[in-house]
Image: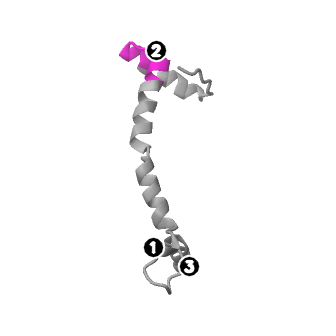
Amino acid sequence: MKRTQIYLPKKLHEDLRLLADREDISMAELIRKNMEKFVKKNKISQAKYDLLAFFADPPKEYLITKKLKKSTVELVREERD
């Protein structure tokens, strides 16, 4: 494991301590357990990231027509702005 130090607001620290006491585990274990859940829920796989990157800026040979010279992101930005 890697040691990490963080600063918490007093109220949050107290709430975490109470929750840890209630579950009969250390605050560190409570934080690790919940951070793991958070990261799994919010993590994007490398495959999904690569796919999003491909659609955001496809290689020129994958553009739909020769007229279309801009990436999806550029087209959306132009429409938005």
Residue 26, label in figure: 2
Extent of the magenta region: 20-31
Residue 78, label in figure: 3
Q: Report x, y in % for residue 15.
A: 48, 24
Q: Amino acid at mark 1?
A: Tyr
How would you rate the neighbour count of disc 3 (Cα within 10 Å): few for under 14, some for 14-19, many for 20 or more? few
Q: Residue furthest left?
A: 23
User: On screen, 27 above or below 73?
Assistant: above
Cβ–Cβ under 8 Å for marks 2 and 1: no
CA–CA distance in space, label 3 to label 1:
20 Å
User: On screen, 8 above or below 66?
Assistant: above
How would you rate the neighbour count of disc 1 (Cα within 10 Å): few for under 14, some for 14-19, many for 20 or more? few
Which SS class for mark 2? loop
Count the labels in the image.
Answer: 3
Q: Amino acid at mark 3?
A: Glu
Whether residue 2 is in magenta: the answer is no
Which of these two is toward me, 74 or 37?
Answer: 74
Which of these two is toward me, 64 or 56?
Answer: 64
Q: Residue at x 40, y 38 (%)?
A: 40
Q: Report x, y in % for residue 17.
A: 48, 18
Q: Residue at x 46, y 14 (%)?
A: 26
Which quarter shows the C terminus? bottom right
Q: Residue at x 53, y 28 (%)?
A: 12
